[in-house]
Image (cartoon, coloured by chain):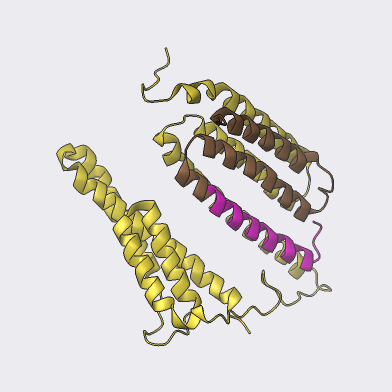
């Protein structure tokens, strides 16, 4: 017997089997292509297909549970792609260093040309816009709020030559991340220990997630500045 | 009124065609062409998520697709510069 919650619409139920079969076909195509390829970077690109098949299978559930499972899946896939590409690059560098005749050329970034952001809005508006974005993100809390507040931090970090406020240095990212995990875990445990405090634990978890996502997005913005602001 | 199922089946077909194009499509010897072909499949998955009303998942998928494409381009460009076999 299969338990189906009564609030799942009938359309989603009729779309369940086609979604599963389609995702299986996509996963099969991706796995065959990975098995047939020899070169590492092609295998890394083809891994995306497996991730897409995973997303379709999870989304076939059709409720909020699917949405809650897709978000970490996507983020983990992103981190995995980043880590494996770095490993590929460092392995290739080791190969070149082992060969005495070859010499490493100067490394380049994603933007080969100097890419200076000389827009007027970057010098006049960022304080106010970043403040509004961060305040609205804190008001929203949770994943969405983290993304909005992180957008504010990115905007401020990209236009750090703004007059007025001193330059924000996000050195304590690791500490903020630890506090966020503590909030999240306390909220999670409290949810089971004292279920009548559910709104407190919900807000603990939401604020932890806000700190986490905002600091991560801000960190990405700081890393991008290394690429963008070079002369 | 266009039915939701139309979006759903079109998305599934687009995802399958896109994954076929990524695996054995024309010009996939070049890793950049292969990366672009992955976008077709991801647009199909976007349509599937749209038909299921998964707004947050859709937004995150779009954002991570962009970031993954940038990461892959950076890796491909650096590998080609180092003279590796790509």
- Asked whether A15 or A94 is in front, the reply is A15
> What is the magenta range?
B61-86
The residue shown at (80%, 39%) is B24
Q: In x, y percent, where is residue A23?
A: 61, 31
Seen as rendered, the residue at the extreme bottom is A163
The relative height of residue A189 versus residue A81 in the rendered view (above or below) is above
Q: Chain A is drawn in which colour?
A: yellow
The residue shown at (22%, 38%) is A192
- Asked whether A195 or A185 is in front, the reply is A195
Which of the 4 quarters of the picture holds residue B44?
top right
The relative height of residue A187 versus residue A159 in the rendered view (above or below) is above
Q: Does the magenta stretch include residue B68?
A: yes
Q: In x, y percent, where is residue A216?
A: 44, 62
Q: In which quadrant is the C terminus of chain A drawn? A: bottom right
Name the magenta segment's main secondary structure.
helix
Number of marks in picture: 0
**Residue B34 makes an appearance in the image:** yes
The residue shown at (60%, 36%) is A53
Q: Chain B is drawn in which colour?
A: brown
Which of the 4 quarters of the picture holds residue A113?
bottom right
In the image: residue B56, left or right of residue A82: left
Q: Does the magenta stretch include residue A106?
A: no
In the image: residue A198, left or right of residue A18: left
Seen as rendered, the residue at the extreme front is B1
In the image: residue A205, left or right of residue A125: left
The residue shown at (45%, 65%) is A151
Q: In which quadrant is the N terminus of chain A drawn? A: top left
Q: In x, y percent, where is residue A153?
A: 42, 70
Q: In x, y percent, where is residue A206?
A: 30, 51
């Amino acid at each position: 017997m299969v338990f189906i919650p009564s609030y799942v619409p009938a359309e989603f139920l009729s779309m369940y089997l086609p979604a599963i079969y389609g995702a299986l076909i996509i996963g099969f195509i991706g796995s065959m292509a990975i098995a047939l390829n020899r070169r590492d970077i092609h295998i890394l690109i083809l891994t995306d297909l497996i991730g897409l098949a995973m997303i379709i299978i999870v989304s076939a559930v059709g409720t909020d549970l699917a949405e809650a499972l897709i978000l970490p899946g996507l983020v983990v896939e992103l981190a995995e792609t980043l880590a494996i590409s770095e490993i590929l690059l460092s392995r290739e560098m080791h190969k070149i260093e082992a060969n005495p005749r070859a010499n490493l050329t100067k490394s380049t970034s994603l933007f080969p040309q100097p890419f200076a952001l000389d827009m007027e809005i970057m010098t006049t508006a960022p304080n106010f816009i970043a403040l509004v974005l961060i305040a609205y993100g804190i008001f929203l809390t949770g994943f969405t709020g983290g993304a909005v507040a992180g957008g504010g931090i990115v905007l401020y970090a990209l236009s750090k030559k703004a007059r007025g406020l001193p330059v924000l240095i996000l050195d304590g990212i690791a500490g903020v991340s630890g506090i966020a995990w503590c909030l999240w875990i306390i909220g999670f445990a409290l949810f089971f220990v004292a279920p009548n405090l559910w709104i407190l634990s919900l807000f603990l978890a939401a604020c932890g997630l806000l700190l986490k996502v905002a600091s991560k997005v801000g960190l990405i913005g700081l890393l991008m500045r290394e690429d963008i602001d070079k002369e | 009124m266009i039915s939701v199922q139309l979006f759903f089946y079109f998305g599934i077909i687009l995802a399958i065609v896109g994954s076929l194009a990524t695996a054995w499509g024309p010009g996939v010897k070049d890793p950049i062409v292969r990366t672009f072909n992955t976008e077709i499949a991801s647009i199909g998955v976007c349509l599937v998520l749209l038909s299921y009303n998964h707004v947050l998942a859709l937004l995150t998928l779009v954002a991570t697709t962009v970031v993954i494409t940038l990461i892959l381009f950076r890796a491909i460009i650096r590998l080609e510069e180092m003279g590796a076999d790509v």
